[in-house]
Amino acid sequence: MDKHGSESYFVEGEGLLAESNEGRDAAAPQVASLQAAPPFRFSRMGPKGVNRQLGEANLKKVAREMAAGGGGAGRIPAGFTYLGQFIDHDLTFDKTNVMLGQNVSPAQLLQGRSPALDLDSLYGAGPQDPESAKFYEADGIHLKMGKTRAAGGFPGKDGFDLPRGDGTTTAAKRRAIIPDHRNDENLAVAQTHLAMMRFHNRVADGLPASVPAGQRFAKARELVTKHYQWMIRTDFLPRICAAGVINNVFNQGRKAFEVGVPANQLPTMPIEFSVAAFRLGHAMIREAYDWNKAFDDGAGTLFWLFVFSATGGDLGGAPRLAADWTADFRRLYDFKEANKPNLAVPDGKFNRAMRLDTTLVDPLRTLPPGTFGGSDSMAFDNPRRNLAFRNLMRAKMVKLATGQQMATFLKGKGVNLTKLTKAQIRNGNGGADLSLLTTSQRDAFLKDTPLWFYIMREAELNNGKLKGVGARIVAETFHRAIEGSQASIIRDTSFKPSLGPNNSTFRMVDLMLFAFESKKALLAPLV
Ligand code: HEM
């Protein structure tokens, strides 16, 4: 089983807060010079939550209630859940893990360990870097894709699995040859990664012949990255977050995070985003999907999506993905949005994400240890396998500000928001039930509410869309990450999308149509 390396929170101005060897960071770099340098750069947007952290017994109970299942159905197409996970891994990827140490300058090092929406989880350090060359075809332009193996009566096909096959043992061969193994943690995120590879390769194919060979990779990457950022700004974010807040931040600027810094200064990653707000995606995960023609009617369970990956599972014991598990993207994204009714499935086959609220589906109470680098022998009911408990404990570990502290902080920065009342936090709207807490536990919880829970309650009370504290943290962090990327649609104000239906539209469905050439046989290869 592939293990994640140690997780460290190097918070700017505070140093290394704590370390645990059960984290989500990709393998730690082997090169001494990189080990000596500060790891990925986190920061704190708001105040410290000193004397505001709840006891472990309290958090354990809350986590149990959060991951008890239930919760509402949402409207967002389910593909956006795993696009969100892919984006998260892009933001929090430590590129120095795949860089060749001796050649890394201090400036590159800082950049490699700074969050940006620049797809380094897809590109690694680029085809010229000896450590990353393995991600590319011999031309140094196209990304290498893998082949599925024949299964269930479906033939194996090139381009439908992540590239694998290095090493001699089955386990080594199974390991995906991609920069960030978190993108092979479940099948849905793995197939999303593959779709992004395909998008890059198609963009590279479509470059005019006049672009010299030596510039083709860089040109394709820039075009891909800017379209990806455009899609995030105009399609992904408005689906999860109140549109007014996104527009306010992108049109008027930030009020709370890295305000007034030079646009091209390297950003940091606020822990309020990574340890709380953007863990919103955990609520969107479904227990089961109508995955494809072979695994229909809920047969694509989360359990199997883990099994058919090589970080959360073992590909069912095989070295490559079984062809009958290839995604049917028509069931994950709604191509009717792009006027392609021929690429739509009947409503009953379409998968929608769970509502953004305070509940997680039950299987997340007992994560496979491979998803967080835990030991295979970990007992089934160990609370450390509960994703909600992990999130709440991680916040305690870094003394994260509470929801109330962040609301006060943001209001002080001139952000217009209304604090949740104790009654709202207690009752929510069809989310986690706090009645099992003792009176004193509940009083403490309503006074100092963990930020992640607070943000999910806000969304739950707003029909499943972030607002208030959550919306502001997410919008400002994305704004900064796009601004600080090497290719940036905020810094390059003249950029307009050229790969969608017109020069102001580029949605995820447009990205998929471009990547898969609008062909049913590619978007849904089992049909
Ligand atoms: C089946 C899908 C998923 C699984 C099994 C999963 C599991 C995990 C685990 C085990 C952690 C580390 C917890 C800790 O010890 O602190 C984590 C962190 C995180 N997850 Fe997820 N996650 C999934 C999907 C998502 C989605 C859809 C999003 C967002 C849209 C997301 C956002 C995050 C963020 C922001 C972090 C913290 C930073 C990081 O390490 O990447 N996750 N997740």
Image (cartoon, grey):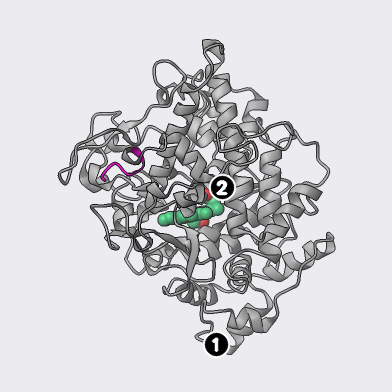
The residue range painted magenta reads: 522-527
Report x, y in % for residue 14.
71, 49
Report x, y in % for residue 99.
52, 26
Residue 33 visible from this viewpoint: no
Q: Name the residue at 51% across, 18% down.
A: 128
- Where 69 falls versus 255 (above or below)? below
- The magenta stretch spans residue 222: no
Quadrant housing the N terminus: top left
Q: Name the residue at 59% across, 58% down.
A: 240
- Where 114 falls versus 259 (above or below)? above
Relative horizontal placement of residue 54, taking residue 408 as reference (left or right): left
Question: Chief secondary structure of the magenta span?
Answer: loop
Observer-nearest of 433 and 475: 475
- Where 102 falls versus 482 (above or below)? above
Observer-nearest of 67 and 429: 429
Residue 357 visible from this viewpoint: yes
Q: Which mark is residue 438?
A: 1
Observer-nearest of 163 and 343: 343
Residue under label 2, please give it. Answer: 8
Element marked by disc 1: loop
Q: Residue at the left extreme?
A: 153
Observer-nearest of 213 and 437: 213
Report x, y in % for residue 383.
42, 68
The CA span between labels 2 and 1 is: 34 Å
Q: Based on the displayed image, in which of its 4 quarters is residue 450 positioned?
A: bottom right
Q: Say how many tags the image has.
A: 2
